[in-house]
Each structure stands twice: as structure tokens, then as C-alpha cells.
Image: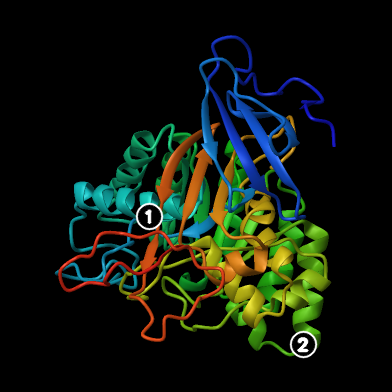
Amino acid sequence: MSADRKQPQPPEDGAATGVGATSLLLSHARLADGRAVDVRLVGDRIEAVGTAGSLGPVAGGARVDLTGHLLLPAPAEPHAHADTALSADSPGPGPYDVPCDGSYDVPCDGEEVRRRATEAALLQLGHGATALRAHVRIAVGRGLTSLDAVLLTRRSLHGLGELTPVAVPRLLTGAAGAEGRALLRDAVRRGGVVAGGRPDGDPDPAGHLEAVLTVAAEHGVPADLHTEGDDPVWLARLAAMAGELGAGVTIGPCAGLARLPSEVAGRAAERLAAAGVAVVCLPQGGCGEAGSRGVAPVGLLRAAGVRVAAGSGALRDAANPVGRGDPLEAAYLLASQAGLAPEEAYGAVSAEARAVLGLPEVRVEAGFPAELLAVRGERLAGVLSLAYSRIVVHRGRVVARTSAVREYCDSAAALDLPRQARTKRPPEPGGPQAGPVVRS
């Protein structure tokens, strides 16, 4: 490898890479292919990659020693629920207590939504997700209050990570759905908002689909539909209509697709692949109003050529009182339960997730975006199994750090334990007595 591989071409998005741009050197990092490298970042791009010890920082730039860390493209979160996150213990009606007409009788506390959405986004950022797409309810009686709160959260996160809301109305068909259609149009006019929907909750799922895709086409935005995916007729209709939409179409969590006969599910998957419809699965189980805790048939979808990304879904809300919002957990579950290789599993939360969000590809190579995650560990399989210490890089600067230290007391047998750091710490009252310290 050359000691200083320059970027192959100037950044297309006008990123600052000249004099005055911020710079950061990530030294002695290990890549997934086993190479030990230095990575120099200038502005929001990777400026150079060289063998470990071969690169120096730009004058005045910072350096981060990544000895013992695996350096990866940063993951992204393609399916979160920002307005309901961390609400499981909140008093009063739950966020999904919605009458059949799609209205909300209980006023929405926008400031409370903003507080929880911000806390959830920072939690996910700390895990490594530098880009998030979050479904947000809009409905009669509450209007766009929750959406506006999440848009405020997006502004407050500027420079730390990217948050894109999906406006999700409940009803879009018939006379009762007229206000929902108007709200959806108003939502996407705010800019940076994806057109969403929940066809399973509408008396006319096909009409709901048509309404969402119409709004998406009118405004040139992507469409993201929350569905179980258990109706092959509706999936065929979706595939037929999606091909006419210039922007991307995503559906998820599609756990119901796994309950269909394999032949029926296979034909549906082939139609989705041909139409370019992406599927976001939720390895931890269902979320929102989804009635099941299953997972989409990842192997069947991938075999048919469907782009499959993985998300976290519910995060401690009424639908699921637990949840970590951790992309590496989603990848771990895909590897341990869905049979994907560790590289494929991580790809579902990184490369595939970024593609679903319409973001540029990230590789640890010169010229690519500086969206990176360093995790203490040597191999990807080990990182997916146990990943406590992490360093998150967004737009070329460190935006989050998590450091974990485990302590053990001295062995009564005074064994010389292999591979354990022998750093001594002063004894603490009631704690381990000057035992070895292991950094995880």
C-alpha cells in the first residue's frame, strides 16, 4: 500500500479540504481486512490512507490513537420512532392510543417529544449511527406538533449527526382521510421530510399507498411505509406503483412476509426487487402498532435481490418497553439468528442502511465521506459480540466517545492470566483490591 494515497477526485459536494479545513489523524487503526493503517481526515472527507505509522496530521490538526480498535464505516439507523422513544414510563394515554378515525383526543406536548427525541438520537449517535431516519406521527387533533418537535431536534443535532423524520399519517382515504392527506402535504413542504404512511391501519390499504406515493411524487421526496407486509396483493400493487416513482421507496418491518407460504413470499420478493423497493427489517422484533414480534425473511429477500437494511425500531415505548437503539445489536442478531456472515450483517446496518437513506457510500479509502466508527476489538465477529468502547466520527470530527473499563480483583491462586492488562489502580473501599484492569 502507498504510504499516502490521495483522494481520486475532488469531493462532489464542495466539502472543505483546503487550507483552513479541520483535520484529524486516526493512527494505528485496524481495518476489517486485517490491515493496520493511519487515516487522515480533512474537512468531511478521508484525505489519505497509509500503512500504520506512515502518515502525520496536517499542521495544527488533532490525532487520535486507535491502537486496539477496529475502524469501520459508520452505521446508520433507517427505522426509529422519535416521537414515542423513551415514553414507556410516561403517565397518561400511550402514544398509540388512537381512535379509529385517526384523531388524537389528548393534546401533544411538543417540548416533551423534543426532549425524548433528542435523548434517543444522542443515545443512537453514541452507538455509532451518524444518520437516522425516524417515523413521526401526524394526525387530526395533534396536527404537526410532534413533527415540528423532531425538526427542532434535528436542528439541535446539527454537526453531531443527521436526523430525517418520516411524516406518518394514520388515515388517508375517504372523507375521514382528507385532513390526513392535507397534513402529509404540509409536512413534506417543510423540507427534509420523507412521506410516510401506515397502510395496515387504513380501511383502504391500496388507497393509502396511492395517496402516499402521490404526495412523494408531487414533492420529489422518498416514501417510507410502515407495514407488516403480509398481504401479497398489496405488495404486488406496491411494486407496480413504485416503479413509476423517481424517489426511493422503502417498506418495513415486513415481519408478516415471513408468515406467507414460501412460494408466495418468494414471488412478492421478486416483484419488490424488480421495482427497486427496499426493506428495512427489525431484528429485535416488531415496533409501533405491528402485531407481531417476528422478523422479515432476510435470506429470502436477499436471495431475490431485494436491498435489505436493518434498524432498531421501538426504543422503550408502549409497543416495546425495552430496546437499545444499537445498530451493532441489530447486526449481531442478524449474524446469530438469521445466518448472515458478520460482514453481511454489518453491511445491513451500514452500507445498506446508508443506501436506503439515500446517503453516499462510505469506505475507509481516500475520497470517501469521513463517517466512521472505531470499536475496541480486532475482528468484526468479536466486535458484534461485545462492543463497549466506541469512538464515533461524523463529518471528520469525533462527536461521541464511549469508554468501558472492567476491573477484577486479584486471583486467589495468583494465576498469570493471559492477555489481561496488568495496570494497577489504587484500591477502592469495598471494591476490587488493586486487581488488573481490562479495557473493553
Residue 344 position in % (x across, y down):
73, 65
Q: Label 1, label 2: how many angstroms apart (C-alpha)?
A: 38 Å
Question: Residue type at mark 1?
Answer: Leu
Would residue 109 be found to the left or right of residue 346 on screen? left
For the residue pair 327 and 140, the one nearer the viewer reads as 327
Location of mark 2 (residue) = 262
Residue name at image x 76 percent, y 49 percent: 35
- Tell me, yes or no, if residue 149 can be seen here: yes
Q: Quadrant of the N terminus?
A: top right
Question: Residue type at mark 2?
Answer: Ser
Residue 16, picture quadrant: top right
Above or below 56: residue 277: below
Residue name at image x 59 percent, y 51 percent: 223
Residue name at image x 51 percent, y 73 percent: 200
Above or below 233: residue 422: above
Residue 42 position in % (x across, y down):
61, 23
Q: Which label is found at residue 43?
A: none
For the residue pair 61 and 322, the one nearer the viewer reads as 61
Location of mark 1 (residue) = 123
Name the N-terminal-most of marks 1 and 2.
1
For this orientation, the residue located farthest to the top is 19
Quick one: SS at disc 1?
A: helix
Residue name at image x 71 percent, y 23 percent: 12
Above or below 403: residue 257: below
Colouring convention used in this rendered image of the protein: rainbow
Closer mark to the observer between disc 1 and disc 2? 1
Quick one: SS at disc 2?
A: helix
